[in-house]
């Protein structure tokens, strides 16, 4: 059904920041490739190139913060992103309560 596919796209690929921020909250700072691998484990078909573009966009938007460590970049969630994740989770809970 197309409506369900649109829902999955919106809640999934359309909001990858939710998954990335949640991952970083649980695991701490990660390299870009580690984040991409986790997204793939969760069932998102993310190419390596798209994954790095996504991370750069998230840095530009203030969702992620880049940290240099040993010549490599680590990513961590910004404080604002953590606050917005908590708000998004509450909104999702409210939605689930309304639907059930």
Image (spheres, rainbow, N blue to C red):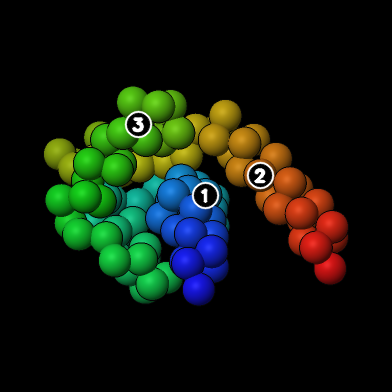
Residue 45 figure quarter: bottom left
- Viewer-proximal residue among 54 and 38: 54
- The C terminus sits in image quarter: bottom right
Q: Is residue 18 left or right of residue 74?
A: right
| Mark 3 or mark 2: whose residue is earlier in sequence | 3
State the residue at coordinates (15%, 51%).
Answer: 49
Q: CA distance from mark 1 to mark 2?
A: 8 Å
- Viewer-proximal residue among 52 and 65: 52
Question: Mark 1: few, some, or many residues within 10 Å (few <14, many ≥20)?
Answer: many
Closer to viewer: mark 1 or mark 3: 1
Task: Classify 100 as above or below 53.
Answer: below
SS for dot 1 = helix
**Residue holding disc 3:** 59
**Residue holding disc 2:** 88
State the residue at coordinates (43%, 27%).
Answer: 62
Question: Mark 2: few, some, or many residues within 10 Å (few <14, many ≥20)?
Answer: few
State the residue at coordinates (71%, 53%).
Answer: 92
- Viewer-proximal residue among 44 and 31: 44
SS for dot 2 = helix
| Mark 1 or mark 2: whose residue is earlier in sequence | 1
Task: Classify 5 as above or below 66.
Answer: below
Position in image of residue 70 (x %, y %): 19, 41
Position in image of residue 66 (x %, y %): 32, 34
Q: Which mark is residue 18?
A: 1
| Mark 1 or mark 3: whose residue is earlier in sequence | 1
Q: Which mark is residue 90?
A: none
Closer to viewer: mark 3 or mark 2: 2
Q: Are marks 1 and 2 in contact (CB under 8 Å)?
A: yes
């Amino acid at each position: 059904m197309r409506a369900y596919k649109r829902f999955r796209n919106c809640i999934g690929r359309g909001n990858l920041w939710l998954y990335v921020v949640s991952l970083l909250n649980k695991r701490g700072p990660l390299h870009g490739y580690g984040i991409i691998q986790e997204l793939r484990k969760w069932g998102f078909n993310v190419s390596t190139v798209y994954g790095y573009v996504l991370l750069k966009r998230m840095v530009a938007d203030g969702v992620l913060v880049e940290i240099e460590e040993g010549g490599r970049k680590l990513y961590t969630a910004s404080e604002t992103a953590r606050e917005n994740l908590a708000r998004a989770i509450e909104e999702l809970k409210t939605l689930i309560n309304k639907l059930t």
